[in-house]
Amino acid sequence: MTRAITVKGVGTETVKPDFVILSLSVEARNKDYKKAMQEAAHKIETLQAAIQTVGYDKTDLKTTNFNVRTDYESKKDRSGNYRSVFVGYICSYWLSLSFDFENTRLSRTLTAIAAREANPEMRIAFAAKNPAEPNKALLRSTTENAKRKAEILCSASGETLGSLLTIDYNWGEINVVSQTRYNMDECMPMMTASEKRIPEIEPDDINASDTAAYVWEIS
């Protein structure tokens, strides 16, 4: 019977964010379906024009989701009973603009968007542009961590670490996004042009981790 030792390896990697994912959402409401669609389309065109002023192509603004739904509200009739009354249509767009992180570029982009009447709700995520590299480093770190643990356990037990028998690893996606979140929402339309200037942002480093189980023979 083969004697073996099973060790869980834990790897960690710290990565500096070098990529920005800017998410925007706009909404148009109107009782007339065609007008709701036209209003939403106008907001999109306004955003496209805004990013073009700071060097992007309008096609850089990608649509990630689109939805049209009916809106109802509850109203009391003369008999005191509540009934649903059609209010209109809500047309919603979710969009994304991604670019290399540089504070001046980010500030100019946000200021250009905030200066337009489209008034989108904005969310900013800071990520690693090439997640494959930190993922490779994580795998190396995980393996080294497991081997060190196995060697220490064997040495303390008076045994010798033998050949690696198996590796159990879950090939899931590793999150290489900073915990820093930057939101700009419905308060933006009430701000003056000077107030809409965006301060510099220094996002937190990305702290990624991964695990795997290793089985070594004890010789």
Image (cartoon, rainbow, N blue to C red):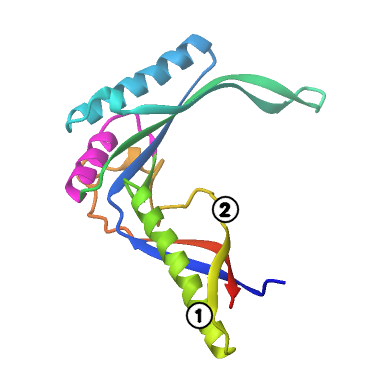
In this view of the protein, which residue sits in the foreground, 5 or 119? 5
- Residue 171 appearing in the image: yes
Quadrant of residue 82 in the image?
A: top right
Residue topped by disc 2: 170
Tags 2 and 1 touching, CB below 8 Å:
no
The relative height of residue 214 versus residue 136 in the rendered view (above or below) is below
In magenta stretch: residue 76: no
- Residue lying at 28% horizontally and 37% vertically, measured from the top left: 114
- Residue 180 appearing in the image: no
* Residue 87 falls left or right of residue 63: right
Q: Position of residue 115 (x, y in %)?
A: 25, 35
Kindly identify the amino acid type of the residue bearing the numbered disc 1. Glu
Q: Position of residue 203 (x, y in %)?
A: 31, 58
* Residue 172 falls left or right of residue 12: right
In magenta stretch: residue 116: yes
Please tell me whether the stretch drawn in magenta is mainly helix, strand or loop: helix
The relative height of residue 125 versus residue 167 in the rendered view (above or below) is above
Q: Position of residue 112 (x, y in %)?
A: 23, 35
The relative height of residue 219 versus residue 55 in the rendered view (above or below) is below
* Residue 47 falls left or right of residue 55: right
Residue topped by disc 1: 151
- Residue lying at 46% horizontally and 72% vertically, measured from the top left: 145
Find the magenta span and give its range: 103-121
Kindly identify the amino acid type of the residue bearing the numbered disc 2. Asn
Quadrant of residue 138 in the image?
A: bottom left
- Residue lying at 70% horizontally and 28% vertically, measured from the top left: 74
Q: CA distance from mark 2 to mark 1?
A: 24 Å
